[in-house]
């Protein structure tokens, strides 16, 4: 996507977001100028945001301050970031159920195996080492309360 | 004399064994982070912030500040030896530092950089002590309109000096102001924009925000990168070179210090701008400007002194006015609040241990860095050979554990991931996240001072223009915006003619 087009869409999105937030702010109560309500300050910020979004769209349409873009490489560079985001979401979802050691091991293993493209054996070894060391550091040394999940009986027995 | 007594008290606090240890840890980690590209002081401070909860406020702040100025020292090593700036503030050092290294003068460049940084740091600390105290006293006379206008000016200057488009920076600042409003209204206790999540009643936490925008977003961006760093093998000798070489750089160091000190105070200024400005000045003053970029000692001495001076002087507005001039100071602002300390004019009076202890710990930290930096160069260079992909998992882990440990809440993990995606999208669209964080931090004070001013004046906006300080701040802010709008328009008209 070209830079100007991208800025135009970003500006448009900001304009709409600002209008939506301004509308939400009015529901909180604007109050009077001498006694501003909960939504007063938020309303004016949202309006300013809309104006700025409008300016950004106009600026990109007129081509003011346009810069040259890095050419599109044709590679799916976004794939890994998207997959990692999903993985982090799953990490959060299973954090308390499976516990810190298990989810951390799985996360690190997947990162090393598929993101860093290490061999399976090396990925397992690195994941086990990093998980054990981080558990020792955060839970034992620093005393942070991390969920032990399905390994709680084993870890408490140690 | 009174200030010297305070400084002596601060030195006593800084030399307490535990504080000395935290200072050492801070500068050591800072030095390490400065060496490693891709991890900045902001992200590191955010990562380590939850770990400081168990420390005393003085120890925690000393350690976090140590990370920032320690970074400036570390960043120069990689700029000189491998032409990879560990920090944005050391980008300019690459030009002449690396060329000096190629000529076999790596030791000289590193020595000038370290000692220049030490001199700049020392002078800045004295400046900090002498400026902050009277400024804090003067700020006690500020009312809500002055505070509101000063923050307006601060945010406008920040967006004016920010990298890239001012319009985009202003949008980011407005987003930050809005994010800071999420939570209970301070006057009516009405929930605002919480989307029904009870976790948002206290507002968006600074840790998920900063870790997401600077930690997770950085990791996501780096996953796209396939570049491999080339390490230039060189012999390092002559760190403590001849006096003649040193004397050649003395004025550059002093000029760099002066530029760095004053640039650090300006909102949005900081170490990056200081290093670029001082380099430009040296080139202008030089009798042989054409030699800059080919390995000139002044091209290393000035920016290195400037970035360190700026790193220290940027504490002045934070400690005396309660206004962080850059994003790193915004994180430090958050850290002070977490430890129950309100930065601003009352800090010196109410928490002299924190204020003077921090100021003097920086002097101690600079001395530690000078001793630590040079012998560890070999280790830092070897560390650079560790591929970023191995560091990636450690950064992720620190982010996840750090954010969870604040409130033992999985919600914070989700929040951090959302801000991570947001930060990644911002990078793609060339929006700078720094104004967002700064505005977010200032948002509660900004809103309170605005509402208080209106209540005081009975809704009359002229209160902001009838007071001299407030009027001056708003006029300067308005002129800066006008200048920014007018210059591209005039350029476009000129080009079409």
Image (cartoon, rainbow, N blue to C red):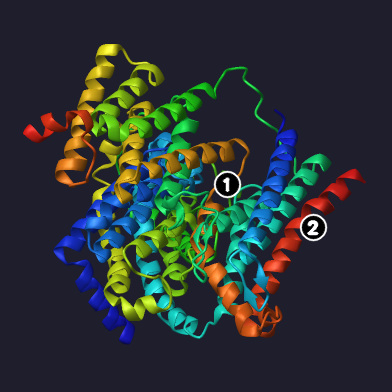
- Res B280 visible: yes
Q: Quadrant of residue B360?
A: bottom left
Viewer-side residue, B163 vs B339: B339
Q: Quadrant of residue A122?
A: top left
Quadrant placement of the C terminus of chain A: top left
Residue shown at 36%/23% (left/top)? A111
Query: Is circle 1 on the same chain as circle 2?
Result: yes
* Furthest residue toward right: B497
Residue shown at 39%/17% (left/top)? A114
Q: Quadrant of residue B309?
A: bottom left
Is A16 situated above or below B124?
above
Viewer-side residue, B141 vs B82: B141
Disc 1, SS: loop
Quadrant placement of the N terminus of chain A: top right
Horizontally, residue B473 falls left or right of residue B25, namely right
Residue shown at 51%/36% (left/top)? B421
- Letter of the chain that mark 1 sits on in the rendering: B
Which sits earlier in the primary sequence, circle 1 or circle 2?
1
Q: Position of residue A15 (x, y in %)?
A: 72, 47
- Res B224 visible: no
Is B1 situated above or below B130?
below
Q: Which residue is mark 1?
A: B432
Distance between mark 1 and mark 2 Cα atoms: 22 Å
Pointer 1: residues within 10 angstroms few (<14), some, or many (20+)? many
Disc 2, SS: helix
Is B470 situated above or below B422?
below
Horizontally, residue B404 falls left or right of residue A9, namely left
**Mark number, residue B486:** 2
Residue shown at 40%/50% (left/top)? B207
Pointer 2: residues within 10 angstroms few (<14), some, or many (20+)? few
Q: Position of residue B21 (x, y in %)?
A: 19, 57
- Letter of the chain that mark 2 sits on in the rendering: B
């Amino acid at each position: 996507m070209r830079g100007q087009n991208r800025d135009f869409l970003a500006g448009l999105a900001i304009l709409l977001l600002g209008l939506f937030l301004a509308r939400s702010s009015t529901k909180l109560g604007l109050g009077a100028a001498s006694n501003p309500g909960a939504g007063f300050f938020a309303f004016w910020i949202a309006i300013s945001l809309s104006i700025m979004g409008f300016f950004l769209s106009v600026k990109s349409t007129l081509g003011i301050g346009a810069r040259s873009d890095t050419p599109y490489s044709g590679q799916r560079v976004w794939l890994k970031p998207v997959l990692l985001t999903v993985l982090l979401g799953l990490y959060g979802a299973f954090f308390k159920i499976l516990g810190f050691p298990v989810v951390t091991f799985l996360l690190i293993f997947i990162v090393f195996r598929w993101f860093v493209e290490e061999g399976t054996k090396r990925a397992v070894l690195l994941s086990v080492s990093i998980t054990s060391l981080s558990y020792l550091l955060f839970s034992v040394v620093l005393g942070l309360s991390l969920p032990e999940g399905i390994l709680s009986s084993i870890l408490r027995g140690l | 004399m009174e200030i010297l007594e305070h400084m002596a008290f601060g030195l006593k606090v800084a030399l307490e064994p535990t504080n000395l240890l935290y200072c050492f840890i801070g500068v050591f980690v800072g030095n390490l982070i400065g060496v490693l590209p891709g991890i900045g002081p902001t992200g590191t401070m955010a990562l380590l912030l939850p770990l400081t909860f168990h420390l005393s406020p003085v120890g925690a702040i000393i350690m976090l500040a140590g990370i920032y100025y320690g970074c400036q020292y570390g960043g120069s090593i990689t700029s000189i030896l491998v032409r990879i700036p560990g920090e944005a503030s050391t980008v300019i050092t690459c030009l002449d530092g690396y060329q000096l290294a190629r000529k076999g003068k790596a030791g000289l460049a590193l020595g000038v950089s370290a000692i220049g940084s030490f001199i700049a740091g020392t002078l800045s600390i004295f400046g900090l002590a002498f400026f902050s105290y009277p400024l804090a006293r003067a700020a006690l006379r500020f009312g809500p309109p002055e505070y509101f206008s000063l923050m307006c000016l601060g945010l406008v200057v920040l967006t004016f000096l920010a990298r890239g488009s001012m319009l985009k920076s202003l949008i980011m600042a407005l987003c930050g102001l809005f994010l800071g409003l999420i939570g209970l209204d301070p006057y009516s206790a009405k929930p605002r924009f919480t989307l029904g999540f009870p976790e948002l009643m206290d507002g968006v936490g600074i840790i998920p925000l900063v870790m997401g925008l600077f930690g997770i977003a950085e990791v996501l961006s780096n996953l796209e990168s396939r570049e491999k760093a080339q390490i230039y093998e060189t012999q390092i000798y002559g760190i403590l070179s001849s006096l003649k070489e040193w004397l050649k750089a003395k004025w550059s160091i002093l000029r760099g210090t002066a530029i760095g000190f004053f640039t650090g105070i300006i909102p949005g200024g900081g170490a990056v701008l200081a290093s670029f400005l001082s380099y430009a000045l040296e080139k202008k003053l030089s009798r042989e400007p054409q030699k800059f970029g080919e390995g000139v000692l002044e091209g290393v001495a000035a920016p290195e002194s400037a970035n360190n001076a700026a790193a220290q002087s940027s504490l002045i507005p934070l400690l005396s006015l309660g206004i962080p001039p850059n994003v790193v100071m915004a994180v430090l602002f958050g850290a002070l609040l977490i430890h129950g300390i309100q930065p601003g004019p009352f800090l010196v009076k109410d928490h002299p241990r924190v204020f003077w202890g921090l100021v003097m710990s920086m002097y101690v930290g600079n001395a530690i860095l000078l001793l630590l930096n040079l012998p560890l160069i070999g280790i830092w260079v070897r560390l650079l050979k560790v591929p970023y992909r191995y560091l990636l998992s450690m950064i992720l882990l620190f982010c996840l554990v750090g954010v969870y440990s604040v409130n033992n809440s999985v919600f914070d993990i989700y929040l951090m991931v959302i801000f991570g995606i947001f930060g990644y999208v911002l990078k793609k669209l060339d929006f700078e996240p720094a104004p967002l964080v700064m505005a977010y931090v200032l948002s509660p004070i900004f809103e309170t001072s605005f509402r208080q001013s209106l209540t005081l004046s009975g809704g009359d906006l002229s209160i902001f223009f009838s007071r001299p300080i407030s009027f001056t701040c708003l006029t300067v802010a308005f002129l800066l915006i006008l200048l920014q709008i007018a210059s591209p328009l005039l350029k476009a008209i000129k080009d079409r003619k």
